[in-house]
Image: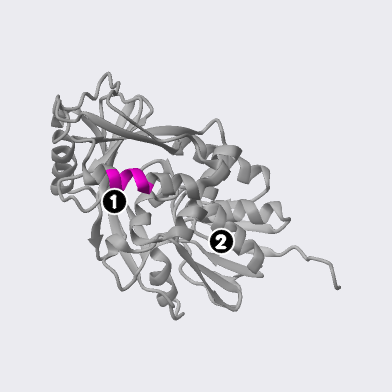
Amino acid sequence: MDGILLNKKIGIIGGGITGLIVGIFLAKKGHEVSIFEKNTLLSETSSKTTKLLHGGLRYLENFHFNEVKNGLNDRTWWLEHFPKQTRKLEIIIPFTNIFSSALIKSFFGIKLYEFLAGSKNLGKSSISKQIKHDHFVLKDKYKTYLSFFDGSMDDYSLGKELISLAKKLNIEILEFNEVKNFDTQGTIDKNHFDKIILAVGPWSKILLEQNNIKSKKDIDYIKGSHLIINRKLESGLMFTGICKSRYIFALPYRDHTLLGTTEEKVTHPEFPKISKNESKYLIDSFNQILRKPILKKEIIFSYSGVRPLIKSKDNFHKSSRDFFIQENDSLLTIFGGKWTTSPSIARKIVTMI
C-alpha cells in the first residue's frame, strides 16, 4: 500500500564494525536482521586499528575535503552516543624549530581540520614550548610543540557495548558461520532474504568473484601493524617516521602505549602478521625523538590488520578512505570505509533498502 513501509528480512554477511553498525541501524528501523560471521564479531580487521575516531587529518594533503568532513561528523556521532567508551584526546606534534616549514604546513592543515569540524570541533589547537610527559621524554632538540584534539576509543569495551545493543534489538547473531554461497536474488546458503548486505572488508571482491558476481571495484590490501609497549602516555604523539612519507602515532591505550601504524601492500588479506622490518621501523622511528629509547623487552603485544582501500590511479598512500556501495538486485556490497565512518555507511544502506 502507498505510504506504508514494509519491514524486510535482511541478511548481513560479515560481523565486523561495518556489518554490526549497519545491522543496528536497520534493526532500529524495524527490519529483521541476521548477521553471519565466520569467526566472532569484531575479531578481524575491526579489532586491529589505531583506536582513533578521526576525520583523517593527513587526507587533507590529497584534497579529500568531503571525506574528512564526513569523517569528522561521524567522529561526533561516536563521542555523543558512546561517551563511556570514547573520549577526546590531545595529540602533540614535536618540531625542532618554530619557524620550520613543516610546522607551518601542519599548523594550517590542523586549522583547516578544525574549520571542517565546525561547531563539533573538540578543542583549539595551539603552539607551545612546554610539554609534560612523565614516561615519554623527548630529545632536547624538540623545542616546539603543536597540539590538537581528535577522538579516541577503547575498541574492546565499545565493541562489547555494540554487541549488547545488537542483542537488545533482537539481531540474530550467527558466529562461526562462514558463508560461501550467496546470490543477487537474496539467497544465503539456501536461506532467503529480501536484501543481502556483503560487509566483509578486504574480502568483498574475493567473495563476489567466488560467487560469479562481477566486482565494480578493485581493492588494495594494505597491512597496518602496531606495537603495544609497557610505557604510559597521557597525550598522543604524532610525527613522521623514518620513511618520511606518513605520520605515525604513539597513543595512550589503557595503561600502555600503542605505536603505529605501518602501511605495507600485501597480495591477500588472510592471516596478517607484523614483520621484523615493521617492528624495527616503528621502534627506530620513535627512538629518533625519544631521550630514553624503546627496548625490545618493553614490547608486550603486537598485531596487524588489513585495510581494504578502493584502488585508485594514485599511489595507495594517496588513496581515498571513502566507501562505495555496489548494488546487484537484492545484493548490496560495501567497499572501503573504516571504523569511524561506519555510521555514514549505515545511513546510506538504510536509504537503499
Determine which residue is flagged by label 2.
Answer: 12
Residue drawn at point x = 34 percent, y = 71 percent: 312
Question: Residue 243 placed where, x, y %?
Answer: 16, 51
Q: What secondary structure is found at the residue carrying circle 2? A: strand
In the displayed image of the protein, which residue is found farthest to the front? 99
- Image color mode: one colour
Frontmost residue, 58 versus 221? 58
Q: Is residue 335 left or right of residue 260?
A: right
**What amino acid is at disc 2?**
Ile
Magenta segment includes 256: no
Q: Is residue 296 above or below residue 168?
A: above
What residue sits 75% from the left and 62% below the top? 7
Q: Is residue 203 above or below residue 273?
A: below
Residue marked by disc 1: 224
**Is there any visible trace of residue 11 in the rendered image?**
yes
Q: Earlier in the sequence, mark 2 or mark 1?
A: 2
Span of residues in magenta: 104-109
Residue pictured at 23% horizontal, 46% vertical: 101
- Cα separation, mark 2 vs mark 1, equals 26 Å
Place of residue 129 in the rendered image (x, y in percent of width and height, measured from the top left): 27, 26
Q: Tell me if residue 106 is in the magenta stretch.
A: yes
Magenta highlight: main SS = helix
Specify the quadrant of the image occupied by residue 239. Answer: top left
> Which quadrant of the rendered structure holds the N terminus?
bottom right
Residue 182 in picture, x, y percent from top left? 52, 72
Q: Amino acid at mark 1?
A: Gly
Q: Please state if 10 lies on the left or on the right of 292 as rendered.
A: right
Give residue 340's mark.
none
Q: Residues within 10 Å of mark 1 (few under 14, many from 20)?
A: many
